[in-house]
Amino acid sequence: MKPNVRPHPGTVQVPTLFLDFDGVLHPNLAAPHQRFSRLPLLVEAIDQSSVEIVISSSWRFEWSLARMKSFFPESLRPRIIGTTGTAHIGRHARWQEINRYCEESAISNWRALDDARFEFPDPCEQLIACDGGRGLEHRQCEMLRQWLGDDPSSSSAAT
């Protein structure tokens, strides 16, 4: 499966968030009614930014991009621009998949919100790691805000 990519136009590098679902947007092993329970925290953390989202979750193997977008509030759906492609087999698989997407889309300003630390090299400055048993928490949201505070395409950076 070829990644669903959209090259970024212009010279300003739009920040891109690679997003995992299980262990991030809800705790691992969440009951169906608990799924996406941490999504409001993510929305609050990125709402005022220009960040675009690429889904790196393994859910991409089971669900279409359109279906996965439907899990998100209407306001975020246009910013979900694609999914990483085929699975990489080997060491640091998620990191390899993200890097392949970044190379194909000329992305250099990115972060990954993920609970699977073993899927990334140690250290990996682009990884914002979550505790998979709890999912996204305020600490990770603050890390997102700090990164996005350096967003040159946001209106607050122009002041």
Image (tube, rainbow, N blue to C red):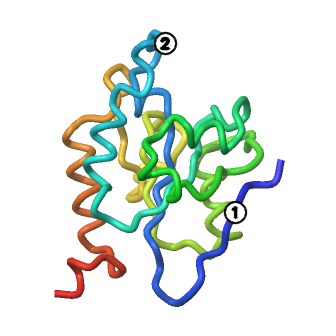
Quadrant in which the C terminus appears = bottom left
Q: Residue furthest front?
A: 74
Q: Is residue 64 left or right of residue 19?
A: right
Q: In front here: 10 or 105? A: 10
Label 2 sits on what residue type? Pro
Q: Secondary structure at mark 2?
A: helix
Q: Is residue 138 above or below residue 133?
A: below
Instruction: Locate residue 153, reporting x and y percent.
Output: 36, 80
| Badge 1 density bin: few <14, some 14–19, many ≥20, Cα 10 Å | some
Q: Is residue 62 above or below residue 17?
A: above
Quadrant hosting residue 154: bottom left
Task: Find disc 2 in the rendering and name its residue.
Answer: 32
Q: In front here: 125 or 77? A: 77
Which residue appears at 74% of the width and 55% of the height? 3
Q: In front here: 152 or 119? A: 152
Q: CA distance from mark 1 to mark 2?
A: 30 Å
Quadrant hosting residue 59: top right
Instruction: Locate residue 40, reporting x and y percent.
Output: 30, 37
Q: Residue furthest top?
A: 31
Which comes before the other along the chain, label 1 or label 2? 1
Task: Find disc 1 in the rendering and name its residue.
Answer: 5
Q: In front here: 89 or 36? A: 36
Label 1 sits on what residue type? Val
Which residue appears at 56% of the width and 53% of the height? 54
Instruction: Locate residue 71, reporting x and y percent.
Output: 51, 34
Which residue appears at 33% of the width and 44% of the height? 42
Q: Are marks 1 and 2 in contact (CB under 8 Å)?
A: no
Q: Secondary structure at mark 1?
A: loop
Which residue appears at 20% of the width and 42% of the height? 139
